[in-house]
Image (spheres, rainbow, N blue to C red):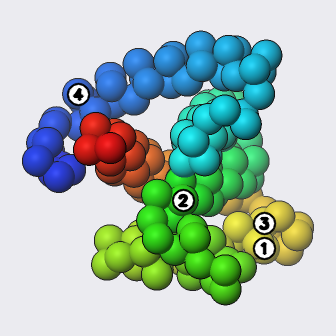
Amino acid sequence: MSQGVGRLVLAQDDKDQIMEVMMSVVQMETKKVSSSGYSKMPKHRVFLLKAYGLLKEAQDKYDSEEYDAALESAYRCALRVAGAKVSLSRIARRSRKPQSAWLQLQLVDDVGREWAKKFSAYSRIRSRVASGMEYGVSPLLVEELMALVRDFLWEVECEAGELMLAA
């Protein structure tokens, strides 16, 4: 199955391989950043670096069958990616904007509105699991969320790359 991202169309296997390479690059970047600090990096890049770390954490927790923790890490990853997308938009410069990352994302554009709708659906279950009201999250639910997060991360990473090339 292929998915289109802007002008780029890749098979899922190609996308997975590219994500693995990007994760390796992020690990190297993170080591560099820890000595120099985040202050010199564009805000969206900081969000994306943190997102990759959370995605790796989610995958590790999933592989260890810690599905509740994997859900939390995947959801937090999605929030960081939303932060990156918002920081690339004019919404970031508004003085009066909503506190919720999902509400801010809705204001960015139609694509942001769709992503916000998808991730908002996981907000309640994440909250219930985090508060201990629910436990034993389905691995399929976590897998679904992680796949969604990967797609969102890929899209925002491509958008950020296009914007950096245009600048």
In the figure, is residue 54 to the left or right of 34?
left
- Residue at the location (60% across, 19% down)? 29
SS state under label 1: helix
- Residue at point 20%, 50% (across, down): 5
Position of residue 152 measured from the top left corner of the image (x, y, whole percent): 41, 54
Q: CA distance from mark 2 to mark 4?
A: 28 Å
Quarter assignment of residue 64: top right
Provide the residue designation for mark 3: 129
Where the C terminus falls, by quadrant?
Answer: top left
Which of the two labelled residues, at mark 2 and mark 4, occupies the earlier sequence position?
4
Asked if disc 4 and disc 1 are in contact, CB closer than 8 Å, the reply is: no
Q: What amino acid type should be assigned to the residue bearing mark 2?
A: Ser
Amino acid type, label 1: Arg
**What whole-number distance in Å separates the C-alpha atoms at marks 3 and 2?**
29 Å
Q: Which amino acid type is shown beneath numbered disc 3?
A: Val
Q: Secondary structure at mark 3?
A: helix
User: Which mark is nearer the camera, 2 or 4?
Assistant: 2
Relative horizontal placement of residue 161, taking residue 121 as reference (left or right): left
Choose the circle earlier in sequence order: 4 or 1.
Answer: 4
N-terminal-most mark, 3 or 2? 2
Residue pointed to by mark 1: 128
- Residue placed under numbered mark 2 in the picture: 87
The residue indicated by pointer 4 is: 14
How far apart are labels 4 and 3 at the CA level? 33 Å
Circle on res. 66: none
Mark 1 in CB contact with mark 3 (< 8 angstroms): yes
User: Mark 4 and mark 1: span between their CA atoms?
Assistant: 35 Å
Looking at numbered disc 4 in the image, what kind of residue is underneath it?
Answer: Asp
Kindly report which numbered mark, 4 or 3, lies closer to the viewer in this rendering: 4
Q: Position of residue 94 (x, y in %)?
A: 59, 78
Q: Secondary structure at mark 4?
A: helix
